[in-house]
Image (spheres, rainbow, N blue to C red):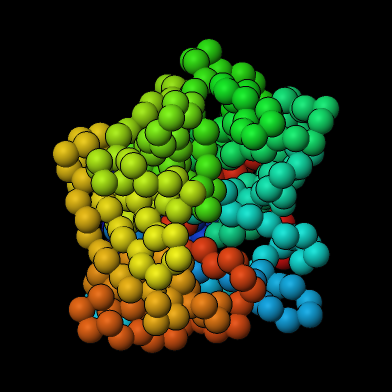
């Protein structure tokens, strides 16, 4: 019996491998020396990261903290199909950091999660974590340290597609009586260089504020709800930071939102579009606005109006079929059908404000930076 040998050109093998999940590729590095060198090369990792942008993920990453006596961070992955939303038991994510520390999720990009352990202290611990390949990177302390405690900071996280680099931007506002000094002090951390540095572009003359200090990462930029120096009338807007060019820009909101208080709004990403969630002052109604064409003010469109008086709370995301993921006043996670106004429980008994939802993808981020997690 003869053995049929199949030969695939090297470029074809390269293309096939560049679309495979990281966990498989880590095993394939053991096939032979040439595959190890190929899969470990910076160029291959860059191509693999670029291919992520063409993959429509059907998974959602959901984080919550248990409300038991021993605080525990729980990360789950759900399969988001057209008709079902079920936990993917094939993906196990163990949180590798001390349970005694309260972490805030700054952002999530290409499978890399940015965590901060404090919201108001300059000596913060910022961690980048890739659960798929079980690696972490603990950032050095920022360069900007104010001697007094009267200040606040805002963090943004995202990916610089030109430099193939992950970056964190930090804005530090010093207190000046009834408000904060403008402009804030700004610095950027680059994973490639492993250091904090200042930026050459002007700092924004805007306050980033709101009930939710959250970001929406869209079109290569982090976005927050903000307002400029108070001049007699409130004017809310979107402030963005471009991770590639490291510049701040302002994006106007619809007129009906621009006159509302920024304290009750948050910038988010919904199905790859820049969006704003607005809550009324009594938290009895929320509305969702989506910018259909990025940067075009006229493309802002109201997508949802949801009555939250029935016990619903904070909006976290939208499923592929259009159902909305919301918290309840009892700190449960539910999926809500806007048409029928019916809801179904997904996760119950979580700590207050501990839920986080985002699209889940796996990548090679931090393969050579940082260290292996113990779990």
Q: Position of residue 190 (x, y in %)?
A: 59, 30
Q: Quadrant of residue 79?
A: bottom left
Q: Is residue 318 visible?
A: yes
Can you name the residue that lies furthest to the top here? 200
Along the viewing direction, whichever of 171 and 6 lies nearer the viewer: 171
Instruction: Using residue 319 as the reference point, say whether residue 128 is left or right of it.
Output: right
Asked if 346 appears above or below 253 in the picture, the reply is below
Instruction: Using residue 263 as the reference point, say whether residue 30 is left or right of it.
Output: right
Q: Residue at x 52, y 33 (%)?
A: 207
Q: How many marks?
A: 0
Q: Quadrant of residue 243?
A: top left
Q: Is residue 30 visible?
A: no
Along the viewing direction, whichever of 136 and 241 lies nearer the viewer: 241
Q: Residue at x 72, y 49 (%)?
A: 118
Instruction: Using residue 97 as the reference point, say whether residue 42 is left or right of it.
Output: left
Along the viewing direction, whichever of 135 and 257 lies nearer the viewer: 257
Q: Position of residue 324 (x, y in %)?
A: 33, 71
Instruction: Using residue 363 as the reference point, say whether residue 321 is left or right of it.
Output: left
**Which quarter of the rendered picture does the C terminus lie within?**
bottom right
Along the viewing direction, whichever of 295 and 151 lies nearer the viewer: 151
Can you name the residue that lies furthest to the left here? 298
Q: Position of residue 195 (x, y in %)?
A: 68, 26
Q: Residue at x 52, y 37 (%)?
A: 208
**Which quarter of the rendered picture does the N terminus lie within?**
bottom left
Q: Residue at x 42, y 51 (%)?
A: 265
Q: Position of residue 297 (x, y in %)?
A: 22, 36
Asked if 174 appears above or below 329 in the picture, the reply is above
Asked if 198 appears above or below 46 in the picture, the reply is above
Can you name the residue that lies furthest to the front here? 232
Asked if 5 appears above or below 48 in the picture, the reply is below
């Amino acid at each position: 019996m003869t053995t049929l040998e199949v030969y695939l050109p090297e470029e074809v093998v390269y293309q096939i491998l560049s679309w495979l999940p990281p966990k498989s590729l880590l095993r394939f590095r053991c096939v032979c020396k040439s595959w190890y060198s190929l899969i470990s090369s910076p160029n291959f990792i860059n191509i693999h990261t670029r291919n992520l942008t063409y993959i429509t993920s059907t998974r959602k990453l959901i984080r919550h903290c248990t409300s038991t006596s021993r605080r525990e961070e729980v990360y789950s992955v759900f399969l988001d199909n057209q008709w079902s939303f079920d936990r993917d038991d094939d993906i196990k994510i163990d949180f590798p950091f001390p349970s005694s520390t309260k972490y805030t999720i700054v952002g999530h990009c290409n499978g890399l999660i940015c965590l901060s352990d404090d919201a108001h202290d300059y000596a913060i611990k910022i961690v980048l974590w890739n659960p798929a390949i079980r690696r972490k990177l603990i950032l050095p302390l920022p360069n900007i340290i104010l001697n007094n405690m009267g200040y606040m900071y805002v963090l943004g996280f995202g990916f610089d597609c030109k430099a193939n680099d992950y970056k964190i931007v930090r804005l530090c506002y010093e207190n000046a009586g009834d408000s904060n000094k403008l402009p804030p002090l700004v610095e950027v951390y680059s994973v490639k260089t492993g250091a904090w540095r200042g930026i050459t572009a002007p700092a924004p003359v805007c306050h980033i504020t709101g009930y939710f200090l959250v970001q929406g990462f869209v079109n290569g930029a982090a976005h927050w709800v903000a307002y400029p120096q108070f001049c007699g009338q409130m004017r809310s807007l979107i402030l963005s930071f471009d991770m590639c060019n490291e510049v701040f820009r302002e994006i106007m909101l619809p007129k009906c939102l621009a006159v509302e208080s920024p304290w009750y709004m948050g910038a988010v990403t919904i199905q790859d579009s820049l969006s704003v969630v607005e809550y009324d002052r009594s938290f009895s109604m929320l509305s969702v606005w989506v910018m259909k064409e990025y940067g075009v003010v006229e493309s802002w469109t109201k997508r949802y109006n949801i009555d939250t008086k029935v016990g619903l709370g904070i909006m976290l995301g939208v499923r592929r079929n259009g159902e909305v993921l919301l918290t309840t006043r009892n700190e449960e996670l539910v999926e809500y059908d806007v048409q029928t106004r019916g809801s179904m429980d997904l996760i119950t008994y979580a700590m207050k404000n501990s839920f986080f939802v985002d699209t889940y993808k796996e990548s090679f981020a931090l393969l050579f930076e940082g260290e292996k997690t113990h779990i």
